[in-house]
Image (cartoon, rainbow, N blue to C red):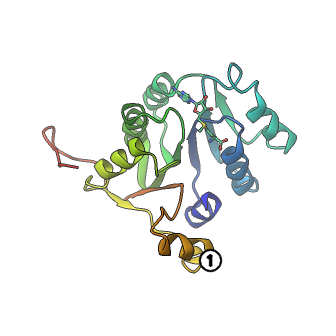
């Protein structure tokens, strides 16, 4: 699914928060492997401490060692630094620390760097904290929910999940449709 969204949009600057085993990173590297001039930043403070470096090991084994820049830092430290460096993004995947406030903080900085037309994805969207966050962002005037890629519309799993009224996907997000110019006192009940 992530690869389809990437292929549809052709992003040049990608960012992922939360690497762990590097499963999503492998799919992202695979999607961008033949593209020149693509920058892909991955942020995870605990890649060595908690994951024994296996995410990076997997990417190297797959031959993607030159496809990404790894930041062994908490996202709350790294993202403001990238923003201060003037980084702009076309694609971001938020899959780090899943509390409401932490994922919101990740989104706050990503929103500041995301170009109009860019997409932001969240993993584990059935989690209450992420559900609440998506409900909040859905009210932003400059964001629209990212539609399911058309090729998946009639996919058997998707149809069954719809029938069962279960969440259709574990990953989902938004496309940025306009510059975020909400006034200082903007608020929308969510
Ligand atoms: C659900 S896992 C990510 C799974 C990964 N995307 C994959 O497909 O294998 C969550 C990750 O967030 C990382 N994490 C925890 N706190 C973080 C923080 N403050 N900033 C960035 N990443 C964090 C954890 O170390 C863990 O690797």
Q: Picture coordinates of residue 40 (x, y %)?
A: 63, 42
Where in the image, quadrant-wise, is ligand 1 located?
top right
Task: Report the residue that reaches farthest toward the top.
Answer: 49
Q: Report if the beta carbon of the residue with label 1 is closer than 8 angstroms to ligand 1.
A: no
Which residue lies at the image location 73% right of the left edge and 47% below the top edge? 26
Residue nearest the viewer, comparing 176 with 163: 163
Task: Report the residue that reaches farthest toward the bottom.
Answer: 154
Q: Is residue 103 left or right of residue 66?
A: left
Which residue lies at the image location 84% right of the left edge and 45% below the top edge? 62
Q: Is residue 42 left or right of residue 134?
A: right
Q: Is residue 74 left or right of residue 70?
A: left
Task: Report the residue that reaches farthest toward the left.
Answer: 185
Task: Report the residue that reaches farthest toward the front.
Answer: 164
Above or below, 20 relative to 171: above
Q: On the rendered image, what quadrant is the N terminus found in?
A: bottom right
Q: Picture coordinates of residue 82 (x, y %)?
A: 49, 30
Classify 10 Å Cα crowding around label 1: few (below 14), some (14-19), many (20 and above): few
Q: Picture coordinates of residue 106 (x, y %)?
A: 43, 35
Residue that numbered label 1 is attached to: 156
SS at badge 1: helix
Q: Is residue 34 left or right of residue 132?
A: right
Which residue lies at the image location 57% right of the left edge and 46% below the top edge? 13
């Amino acid at each position: 699914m992530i690869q389809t969204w990437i292929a549809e949009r052709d992003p040049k600057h990608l960012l992922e928060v939360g690497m762990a085993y590097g499963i999503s990173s492998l799919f992202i590297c695979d999607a961008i492997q033949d593209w020149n001039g693509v920058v892909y930043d991955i942020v995870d403070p605990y890649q060595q401490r908690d994951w024994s470096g296996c995410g990076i090991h997997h990417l190297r084994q797959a031959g993607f060692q030159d496809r990404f820049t790894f930041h062994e830092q908490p996202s709350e430290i790294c993202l403001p630094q990238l923003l201060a460096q003037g980084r702009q993004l076309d694609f971001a995947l938020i899959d780090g620390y899943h509390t409401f406030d932490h994922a919101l903080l990740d989104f706050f900085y990503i929103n500041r760097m995301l170009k109009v037309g860019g997409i932001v994805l969240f993993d584990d969207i059935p989690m209450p904290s992420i559900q609440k966050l998506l409900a909040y962002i859905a009210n932003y005037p400059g964001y629209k929910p990212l539609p399911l890629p058309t090729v998946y519309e009639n996919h058997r799993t998707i149809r069954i999940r719809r029938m069962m009224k279960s969440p259709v996907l574990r990953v989902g997000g938004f496309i940025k449709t306009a510059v975020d110019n909400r006034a200082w006192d903007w608020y929308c009940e969510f």
